[in-house]
Amino acid sequence: MLLNLSILFGFLLILVFAIAKWKIHPFIALLLTALGLGISLGLGGKETVEILLKGFSETLRWIAVIIIIGAFIGEVLKETGGAFRISNRVVKGVGEKRLPWAMGFTGYLVSIPVFVDVAYILLQPVTESLAVKSKQPVLYLGLALTAGLTVAHTLIPPTPGPMAVASLLELEMGKMLMINLFVAGFAMTGGILFVLFFVKNTWLDYDKKLAETHKKAAEITPENNTEGNVFFDILPILAPIFLIGSGAFIKVSSSTLLGTVLHFISLPLVAVSIGALIAIFQIKTKDKKTTINRLVEQAILKSALVIMITGAGGSLGYVIKQSTIQQEVVEVFSTFPFLGIFLPFLVAAILTTATGSITVSLVGTASMLSPIIDSLPVSPEIAAALIGSGAFCVFHANSSFFWLLNRLHEVPPAILYRKFTFQSLTMGISGLIGTLCLWILGF
């Protein structure tokens, strides 16, 4: 039992060194780690390869095309000057000092109906333009946005993970929501304070490249920086978010025509495609077809590496999921009953660290603890909040979002380990503190 856990964390440690210290390309390191781990855990060579390939395809099945379409929307916003106008309006509205908080709350609201990866891709051009406009590092604003995105994704229904936890633990949804909203506030505050204190001066080579790109764009199309309607600029971003959210919040029978249409347009791929169509109408050039084709090609070229590395990260996570690690974690901790209140937090933290998936951590921990939930020294709702807090700890090389940040902003893995990984740990501990406060107050 302990041998398999030791093998798992040994391979994850090797992965960290392979990428950060030995400078092996992430795509190769992730695939080799997944292959070696599967064989070492006794899955067999052929079975490991099949699981690896299935994990790769399952990861990309829903996100690959969305990444390309989202990148296309970003290219259009750059081409038309829309990203400049949006960033100008935001900076004027909230001020440069409050930008991280504004990004965090934006992420919090957006990620309730929309997957984290999709939301970040849609907001990438605005994040980058804001960084240039405010003369702040792109990672500074990007991780502030990430704090809000991951908090909602981990703790707030109707996102899939928290909904699954509520179902598995048979919770009262209203009470769970109120508790998790409070805990989410602690977690997001911790994440943004980490950004304010430890990321403010984290400049990347990409920041220089970004500044030069925006300067050239402004020189080529200076009129785009002031002309145009900001509402129409942001509509390609808001429309997909609204459409996806409508599927989560508006319940209409799928047997009716309205229900069928609503279900269709709320699918992430369809919703983002509609956003892309709206973006196309913003292009005002004589040879519109040529411009569209050029922007599509740029989006594909920029997305290719993101897609491949994200798929490789998914392969590693899938290999881990197909092993018996999750069950062994619970068996190990069940031998230490004195852990009591910390058991949900610790199990979720280990599963997130091991699998790189918040949803797997939430569902796995709730599934494992549901039979003993009444024997824990906390209410089921507090246990759910502990699970959610633990699910933040920690994001690293086997998380697809880790590589999304790496490729979108060209952030070296070593910097992501120091910033993104420790930010997630800070958020988990902050959520734990918030949960313990409620427990002390008798919830």
Image (tube, helix red, strand yellow):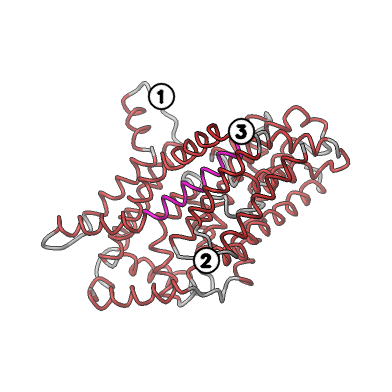
Q: In the shown orientation, is residue 29 left or right of residue 252?
A: right
Q: Is residue 171 left or right of residue 443?
A: left
Q: Is residue 36 left or right of residue 257?
A: right
Q: Secondary structure at mark 2?
A: loop
C-alpha distance separating marks 3 and 1: 43 Å
Q: Residues within 10 Å of mark 3 (few under 14, many from 20)?
A: some
Marks 2 & 3, CB-CB < 8 Å contact: no
The stretch drawn in magenta includes residue 45 = no
The front one of 73 and 336 is 336
Residue at mark 1: 253
Left or right of residue 39, residue 224 in this image: left
Q: Earlier in the sequence, mark 3 or mark 1?
A: 3
Q: Nearer the viewer, residue 19 or 345?
A: 19
**Outermost residue toward the left?**
286
| Residue wearing tag 2 | 412
Dividing the picture into quadrants, the one containing residue 378 is top right
**What residue do we see at 34% from left, 55% from top?**
71
Seen in the picture, residue 209 relative to 16 is either above or below; the reply is below
SS for tag 3?
Answer: loop
Across and down, in percent, residue 366 comes to: 68, 34
175 is higher (above) or lower (below) than 188: above
- Amino acid at circle 3: Leu
Residue at 65% over, 34% down: 42
Q: Quadrant of the N terminus?
A: top right
In the image, the segment drawn in magenta is 304-322
Graded by Cα atoms within 10 Å as few (under 14), some (14 to 19) or many (20 or more), the crowding at tag 1 reads few
How many numbered badges does the structure rendering display?
3
Q: Earlier in the sequence, mark 1 or mark 2?
A: 1
The percent position of residue 443, horizontal first and vertical second, equals: 77, 42
Per the image, the residue denoted by label 3 is 43
Magenta stretch secondary structure, dominant: helix
Q: Secondary structure at mark 1?
A: loop
